Image (spheres, rainbow, N blue to C red):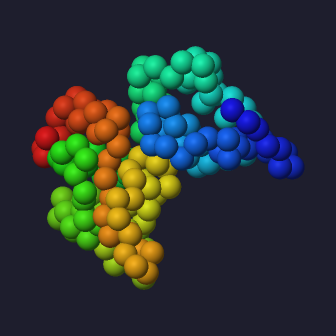
Amino acid sequence: MGYETMGDTTMFSTREWPEKHNHHNYSHTTISSLLANKSGNIKEWDDICGSIGSGLASNPSMDSMRKILLLSYHDLPSHLKACLLYLSIFPEDYEIEKERLISRWIVEDLVQQEEENKCLFEHGESYLNELLNRSLIQVAYKNTDDTIWSCRVHDMVLELICSLSREVLLPWY
């Protein structure tokens, strides 16, 4: 992996990574998203990288990728964990319409009114965008105006959230 230094912060360089969506590249994207949501504190980044292990660069095993996804999951605030786990009800490769998903989150009481000047749907959209920014879900289709129409869950994330949903015995699983 390449690094770039920007002032006091070292950033992972994603320019070296191909755009293909295989498991190896998905793990790099997930690591980048996890670190991007952290402060620029090098110690915090070292701790994350240390918990992943050094084997990922040379041999990205399924166990290493699961570790990365678990770190990303455990880094989520509780309201986003619940929304992510809710996605375990959808089958693999299923295209999930954004409006339908957010409406379901609202009905299940997973979206909270945080700011009075925003409606619940807008809060749900921000939850969806946060999960997208963390590479835990992927855009499936965009409208002509570049707004998100639908999303999907990567098969590795789906496997993890199905497992976690069974462990915590969620009512919808």
Front residue of 56 and 18? 18
Quadrant assignment, res 140: bottom left
Front residue of 118 and 4? 4
Pinpoint residue 65: horizontal percent, then vertical percent. Answer: 45, 28
**Above or below, comparing residue 108 to residue 143 in the picture:** above
Front residue of 160 and 153? 153
Identify the residue at horizontal 32%, vertical 47% (top origin). 153
Q: Can residue 42 be seen in this view?
A: yes
Pinpoint residue 14: horizontal percent, then vertical percent. Answer: 65, 45
137 relative to 105 in the view: left or right? right
Identify the residue at horizontal 58%, vertical 49% (top origin). 37
Pinpoint residue 110: horizontal percent, then vertical percent. Answer: 27, 58
**Above or below, comparing residue 151 to residue 51 in the picture:** below
Quadrant assignment, res 17: top right
Quadrant assignment, res 10: top right
| Number of numbered labels in the structure image | 0
31 relative to 106 in the view: left or right? right
**Above or below, comparing residue 91 to residue 28 in the picture:** below
**Above or below, comparing residue 56 to residue 97 in the picture:** above
Pinpoint residue 71: horizontal percent, then vertical percent. Answer: 48, 33
Identify the residue at horizontal 14%, vertical 41% (top origin). 173
59 relative to 150 in the view: left or right? right
Front residue of 86 and 146? 146
Q: Is residue 102 visible?
A: no
Which quarter of the rendering shows the N terminus? top right
Identify the residue at horizontal 46%, vertical 20% (top origin). 61
